[in-house]
Image (cartoon, rainbow, N blue to C red):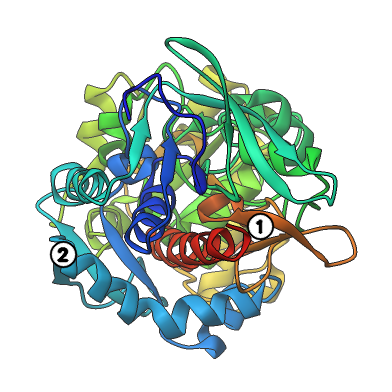
Amino acid sequence: MGESEIHDVDVVVVGGGMAGLAAALVAAEDGARTLCLERLTEPGGSLALSGGYIWTVNSLDEYRRLSPDGDADIAQMIIEELDDGLEWLTEHGIDLTVVPGGMGPGRVFGGRRIRPDPVSGAVMPLAKAFASAGGQLRTQARCLDLRMDSSGSVRGASYRDRTGDHEVKCSAVVLATGGFQGDALLTSTFLGPWADRAYVRSNPGSTGDGLRLAGRVGAAASKGLSSFYGHLLPAPPVRPDPAAFRGLTQFYSEACIVLNMAGRRFVDESRGDDICAVRLIREEEATGFIVFDEARHQADVMEPYVPDAVRTDPLPVVRAAGGRVLEGQTIEQLSRQLFEEYGVPAARATATIHEFNEAWRRNDPSILSVGRRHGLHACEAPPFYAVPVRPGITFTEGGVRADRECRALDDIGRPIPGLYIAGADVGAVSIEGYIGGLAPSLMTGLRAGINAARNANKTA
């Protein structure tokens, strides 16, 4: 069929990132006539911007430790079947290398990394395989609405592309639009009034289309709508473009002290850089300061956050991007700079850092106004540094309520016939606890795609 000749298909997949490409390809290879709609000019979504790590925790116990409020049933499917998913990728020409360990201290993941890079190593081979299987990919195509039949089953979609508005009939739809981090209204509604200060650390096309489309046909929202996975990036005047996301990410915050605009600690930093980002978005101006001394700078700040990266000093990178790195020979001098440049109360900031040092000297985190599970350390060796930061949202963690089969569910837990959810559109795979991004997207994409194809076969 030519570009303007689509009338009926079996499966429509909305989104062309990891989840969408996996869903579309597995459905097409199962014999379903499949149309994939990608909103941006090229497929890939946030997969194209990622580090290419397809990994997750090694056990359900580890999952519950990291994300006790998440959906353990979906997580169990991801953990148990990831090896099969990785094998599926390898069979489709994706070159994967073993990566030992995980992100930061305290996380042990199992999985692989795409070589040589996510675009040439995964996006292009998956898109090519999809075309070879007879699938049709439309870029710059945004799904506008879903169509239901008289029985309440999803049986079609409308979309708009460069040539105009179109209607397509189908037997199943997979929503894989990547979350809602790109939509200021949704992030302000669910993440708080300062969310518009945060960076969108992902592709710009993930603006909640999946959540909205599913809601219009009766699917329920999941829990976890106020949570996201992300990192800290240098505060303005830095304006990072997507190619600079990883290089500018300040992964080391969990090894330091993080202050808010009031000069106070507001989070147990040792829980992880991603938790620091989630907590910071709720603070005034969503702006904070990573504080550390020269000893910490040498021992931890320059250490790689992922096991196959190299030791790098992030401070020159921040400065080269136009960001600020405050520096003082005493804690008091650093605090004065925080006040003069950002209005942070100097006495409060000084007291907070001294309180932290006293807790270290006593080995007693109970004296801290905000506790710390581990990683107490001294901040006493000059010079002292403060890096102004804001959160960057990689993907939102709340989304559409779904079951282990990636079927969309209504508010009493009944499946919406013909509607499947994948990737970051699946809500509550994790809540305030990173268990991987590409691995859940891959596995929910495969599950949603194959179930959508089988649904199409049943209704043909």
Q: Quadrant of the N terminus?
A: top left
The answer to whether residue 248 is left or right of residue 354 is: left
Instruction: Tell me if mark 1 has few (under 14), some (14-19) or many (20+) residues whose alpha carbon lies within 10 angstroms of its own.
Output: many
Q: Secondary structure at mark 2?
A: loop
Q: Is residue 267 visible?
A: yes
Residue 91 location in percent, x, y? 17, 69
For the residue pair 292 and 268, the one nearer the viewer reads as 268
**Residue type, numbered disc 1:** Gly
Q: Do the residues bearing badges 1 and 2 touch, measured as CB atoms within 8 Å?
A: no
33 in relation to 72, above or below: above
Q: Residue at x 31, y 81 (%)?
A: 83
Residue 166 location in percent, x, y? 55, 20
Instruction: Tell me if mark 2 has few (under 14), some (14-19) or many (20+) residues whose alpha carbon lies within 10 angstroms of its own.
Output: few
**Residue type, numbered disc 2:** Asp
Q: Which residue is mark 1?
A: 427
Q: How many numbered marks have been drawn onto this rendered protein structure?
A: 2
How far apart, in angstroms, are the residues tagged by discs 1 and 2? 30 Å
User: Given the current orientation, which residue lies at the most extreme front position?
Assistant: 460
Q: Is residue 378 visible?
A: no
Residue 325 location in percent, x, y? 35, 30
Q: Secondary structure at mark 1?
A: loop
Q: Which residue is mark 2?
A: 308
Residue 116 location in percent, x, y? 9, 52
